[in-house]
Image: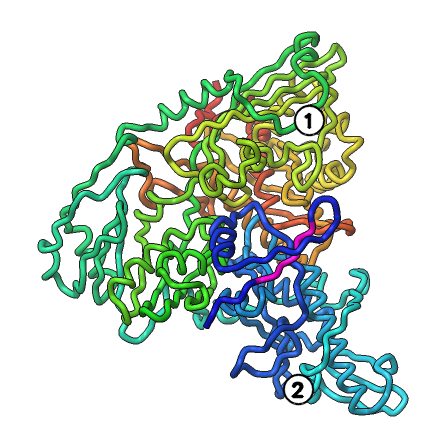
Amino acid sequence: MRTPSMNRQTAPQDGRTRTLKTGRRRFLVDTAATVGAMSLGFHIPMAGAQPVGQPPEINAWVVIRPDETVVIRIARSEMGQGTLTGLAQLVAEELECDWARVTTEYPTPGQNLARNRVWGNFSTGGSRGIRESQEYVRKGGAAARMMLVQAAANEWQVAASDCSVANGVIRHAASGRTLSYGKVAGAAGLLTPPKDIPLKDPSTWKIAGKSMKRLDTADKLTGRLVYGIDLQLPGMLNAAIRDCPVFGGKLVSFDAARVSSMPGVKAVLRVDASTVAVVAGTWWQAKTALDALPIVWDEGQHAKASSAGFAEILKAGLDAPDAFVGNKVGDAAAAIAGAARRVEAVYAYPHQNHATMEPMNATVRFTPERCEVWTPTQNGEAALAATAAASGLPPSRCEVYKLPLGGGFGRRGAVHDWVRQAVQIARQLPGTPVKLIWSREEDMMHGLYHPNTQARLVAGLDAAGKVTGLHMRISGQSILASVAPQNLQKGADPVAFQGLTASGDGEIGYTIPNLLVDHAIRNPHVPAGFWRGVNHNQNAVYLECFIDELAHAAGKDPLAFRREMMSRHPKHLAVLEAAARRAGWGTPAPKGVFRGLAQHKGFGSFTAAVAEVSVSAAGELKIHRIVAATDPGHAVNPTQIAHQIEGSFAYGLSACLFGECTVKDGRIEQRNFDTYPVVRMVDMPAVESIVMPSGGFWGGVGEPTIAVAAPAVLNAVFAATGKRVRTLPLKHTDLRRT
């Protein structure tokens, strides 16, 4: 089968439409470069050539079976965040079907390619799963409804406008006749899709916008849901892998004869220039043999690299002249020089691992004619591109079967190194399915880490305590330089300025008359990647904690101080006021409890939090409560949003309290959860969520709220102890009273 060319339309900034022709080569380049914070917009046709042997479909999004089951196809990945249910709600809302009969399925990236990319972008990251596909999936549901109604009208020989529909039943009021969707689905699928597809006003929603139960919960509870690590295929072998412990190092040699006779071992293989694998009957047999395998590494030029060395490099970047400007208003340097008072602070943020509960894994069956991959992925198309590149086969002869993810957080989005490795192993054992599972240690030592940065903030205050100028210099890693250097803009990384820009999805929430935000790129050899919340995490800590420092220097209440700079940012202010009001800001806290707050805009949503903490005389921190407010524009499933907020705080507090990956002798020191802890139940505060959609825009949910977790807690810690925590994680700070 020849790979079809793909015509796609994107909307340039000038509002015009241009058509791009994309063949196999362009597909591989584009898809392999897809990253968690960037996307392309696609015009999505409402129908395409139906796959041979598949049940009749109304369009690419909707299949209705004769038993009235409604199958909604979901292109985005489900990794616990609820995107699958939310997208199904949007389709079902426009479809006017019976929600109790809804089920879902994943189309494959190979099907998407063969059908002219009818499902659009498969990438799930940057909190884009719903907000960047909501319009075309809603149109998919609406078009299907219109075609079903038209099919019924044709059978009755009446006008479609004289018919109505509710819960999957079409009614002709004048005659009282009814037909269910299942009865007309076959005929509807043969109709020409409508071109004009009006969408409902969200104020009329009955399924979307409501707290519907998740569609995947029952299968998770009963164990029917199959994750990648659970998958079993007939005749399958298992592989364990080891990469050079120092990034950039090479594999020199290994002594296969020493382990070839160990129980279950089938093969000992060189995978690539830096990696060796053992294939055996079970994974534990493969892992046991791998641990016994004598390996010689060339650790390369970074064998003596350390976190201490990185820190010195970043420190030098704070004063370097080679910085890229991300936001500039007026003359910050002059304003600070002429200010009545100058305030300065330096902050630091470490490397952190994604630490997904399910480590990287993929199962591959390779033959010279076809390569099939089963894997949890945040981007099925990027996984397909990696499969094609590693197998040497065209994409049309490859397929990726996307499985639910046991955690993603950005690690399974941009770089599919585990897929490439699994394919390279399976190529050496053609015809035999091979499942590769990374050990926890391999997963910890070979991640794509949260970028390591420092920031110096310098501000000027006038005699009245108002900010006259602010300079924020960030020194540290560029994610794009690591995973997608072709997306740098004249050497600058726009992603580095998330939450600090003059406008857009990460607009700064303060009006400061003289402002400069710049970034000195400093890249150590440890690769950076997209980590849940991305650069919003450290940028919110830097800015929101420093704003608190300025409030203290000005002798003002932190909330009142922020209000003075937020009159032109009403949505930022609205969530901050909501969180403060619910938390009781301005009223006495319980004895020994202190409050801190923070606000931020990320991924198109406005978020704020108030944390309540206490610190004992021995320096033991207890986070009692966090009140969080978010305005995502539209709320598809409010309860699901509340759950994501709570989950994001668990992740964000893990980073704030404990999260740190350090480097010694060129390698990551943390190997498992004993040295890389996450919050336990005893650490987790009560979280009160305020979901306050104001309408008119679509923001994200899974990542924006994580950014306010750490700064709210750190500001509360200062209120409790008088100590500023400027270097994370907090576990290194002595909070004992002095």
Viewed as shown, does residue 549 lie left or right of 348? right
The residue labelled by disc 1 is 558
Query: What amino acid is at disc 1?
Result: Pro
Residue at x-position 77% and y-position 87%? 152
Indicate the secondary structure of the residue bearing disc 2: helix
Query: What amino acid is at disc 2?
Result: Gly
Can see residue 391? yes
Position of residue 528 relative to residue 9, above or below, is: above
Question: Magenta part of the protein: which range?
Answer: 6-11
Q: Position of residue 260 (x, y in %)?
A: 12, 59
The residue labelled by disc 2 is 186
Give the quarter of the image for residue 94.
Answer: bottom right
Using the numbered discs, state the Cα–Cα distance from disc 1 to disc 2 in whole angstroms. Answer: 63 Å
Indicate the secondary structure of the residue bearing disc 1: helix
Q: Is residue 37 magenta?
A: no
Q: Is residue 7 magenta?
A: yes
Residue at x-position 75% and y-position 85%? 151
Q: Position of residue 658 (x, y in %)?
A: 43, 37
Q: Position of residue 607 (x, y in %)?
A: 67, 42
Can see residue 131? no
Give the quarter of the image for residue 536.
Answer: top right
Viewed as shown, does residue 255 lie left or right of 419? left
Residue at x-position 53% and y-position 61%? 78
